[in-house]
Image (cartoon, rainbow, N blue to C red):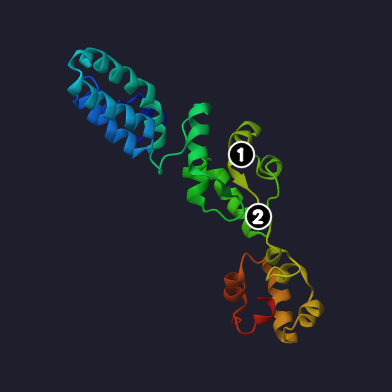
Amino acid sequence: MWQGRDDWFQRYPTWVYLSFIPWVGGIAQIWAGWVIRNYRLLGAGLAFTLVPLVLTDLLPLAWLGQIVLAFVYRTEFLVRTYPQHLPPPADPKLAAKILALRGKFDINTCSKEVLVHQLGLPIAYANDIIAMRESGHQFTHPEELTEIVGIPEATVQRIAPYLTFSYDIRQESYVSWRRANHFDAERLVAVGLEPDVAAQIVAERNRRGPYRSVVDIVKRTGLSTHQLRALL
C-alpha cells in the first residue's frame, strides 16, 4: 500500500517492468495508454507489438524503443493515476499537474474533504475556512486566504489557479437567516417575524452570542422553523 504522497512517485508500475520483455511490453503499454487515455502511448505500444511480427529484424530496435518509452511516460502515468484520497505531493511541478487534472474548486462551497485531500491544505486551515463560511463570510479572491485565514502566501499561490470564488447574495447578512445576528427586534419584526419571536431571538443573541445557523437558532431559542420562515 502506498499511503504517502511523494513516495508514490518513487514506484514503478507493473507495466514499466513488463516493458523490458519483447512483445509483452508492447501489450502492457497498450493497456497503460488506455488507462490514462494517452493514445500516443497506446499507439506506440501497438506498433512495438505488431511491427516485429512482420519485420522480425526490427525486434531489437522495438525492444529498446519500448523500454525508453516506458520511462518517458512513467511519470505521466503516476500523475494521472494518483490516488484521490492523497493530498498533492510536495514537489510543486507534480502538484500542479495533479491539481490541473482535478479541475477547479469553489472555495465558498467545497467540502472539508476537498480542501484537505484535493487541494492539500492542512486540516487546521480547512477548519478555519469552513468556520469563516459558516459565520457568513464569502471569499472573493485568493489573497483573503492569507489575510483572513492566515494561509502562507506560497501555499495560496500554489492552489490559486485551481480555485473559483462564487458569490451568493442569499448568504449576505441583510437577506439571509443571518439577519438574526445583525437586526434589532424592530427590524426583525419589519421583515415578518412576530414581536415575541423577534424579542426572543435578540435576547438569546445578547446572552450567548451570534447564531451559527438556522438549526442553532432553533436549538437555542426553542422556536420552530415555521416561526422563523420570514428569515429563510
Q: How crowded is mark 2: few (under 14 residues within 10 Å), some or many (20 or more)?
A: some
Q: Residues within 10 Å of mark 1 (few under 14, many from 20)?
A: some
Amino acid type assigned to the residue bearing label 1 in the image: Pro
Quadrant position of the N terminus in the picture: top left
Side of 31 where 6 appears, left or right = right
Which residue appears at 26% of the width and 17% of the height? 62
Question: Please, is residue 78 above or below residue 163 in the view?
Answer: above
- Locate residue 145, reporting x and y percent: 66, 43
Side of 179 where 87 appears, left or right = left
Element at badge 2? loop
State the separation of the CA atoms marked 1 and 2: 15 Å
Which is more N-terminal, label 2 or label 1? 1
Residue 161: give its label: 1
Q: To which residue does mark 2 refer?
A: 166
Which residue appears at 60% of the width and 49% of the height? 128
The image quadrant of residue 73 is top left
Instruction: Name the residue nearer the viewer: 168 or 150.
Output: 168
Instruction: Name the residue nearer the viewer: 44 or 77.
Output: 44
- Locate residue 83, reporting x and y percent: 38, 40
- Locate residue 94, reporting x and y percent: 48, 29
Amino acid type assigned to the residue bearing label 2 in the image: Ser
